[in-house]
Image (tube, rainbow, N blue to C red):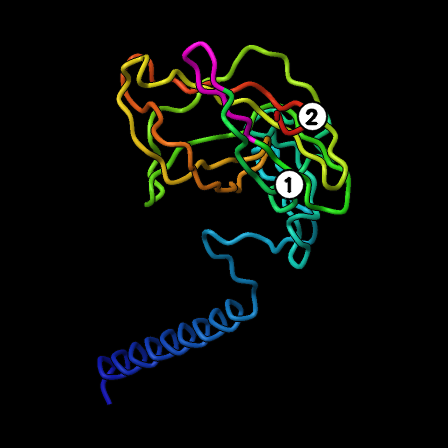
Amino acid sequence: MTIRTLGVRRAALLASSVAMAGLLAGCGSGENTANAPRTESGTVAPATGTTTPSDGTTSAPSGVPTDAVSNSLTPSAPRSPAGGTRCHTSELSASVGRNNPGAGQENFPVVLTNESSRTCTLYGYPGTAFVDASGRQLGPDPKRSSAEPETVRLAPGQSAWAGLSFANPEVSGAGTATPAALVVTPPDEEDPLKVAWKSGEVPVSGNESSVRLIPFSPGTGA
């Protein structure tokens, strides 16, 4: 065997040894990667208790009802001074009293009666709207008077009334429509009550189409 041939064989053996070492090193690297904890983009550590988002509100840990978490959200509308005892829609019935006209005005008491077994309170104005048979509002939103509201306490069976008035359309010349109902929403509530309207036409367009409200007072307004 020549010296040249021996050199070629030694070079081949050396190359084979280097390749084998690289293969073994690669297998070891794979095992280490599998045993190490994985970190993926976008994941976070699981919550272990109440968390506080960047907006300052508080969220409950998993399994805690959301209503058990206090917050400091400001209500969208002012609440009555006796908000904790206020009457809820489900505790009330609504009616419209007899018209008491005068000086070209039509004046109706909107009456809410406490049908519950507890004493509750009303403060302020009802939400009201005339609607047609399909529930579509007729005319503009009522305007509130500048009278100072009072808290009205209603024992079971007692009533409070708020005044609803508008100019007689025959006198004012306003455009008219005949509502199917008056929708009444108690103060600070969202669910309305509906009362069939049986008192004829009301103003819905023109300069004299405003309907006015005065706040609740004790009684039925009769």
The earlier-in-sequence mark between 1 and 2 is 1
Q: CA distance from mark 1 to mark 2?
A: 17 Å
Q: How many marks?
A: 2
Q: Is residue 215 left or right of residue 43?
A: right
Residue 111: quarter of image: top right
44 or 125: nearer the eye?
125
Q: Which residue lies under the disc numbered 2?
A: 218
Q: Amino acid at mark 2?
A: Pro
Q: Which residue lies under the disc numbered 1?
A: 88
Q: Amino acid at mark 1?
A: His
Q: Is residue 117 left or right of residue 195?
A: right
Looking at this view, name the residue that lies furthest to the bottom.
1
Residue drawn where x is 56% and y is 65% of the image: 36
151 or 111: nearer the eye?
111
Span highlighted in magenta in the image: 101-110
Residue 123 lies, in percent from the top left, at: 65, 25
Q: Is residue 110 left or right of residue 19?
A: right
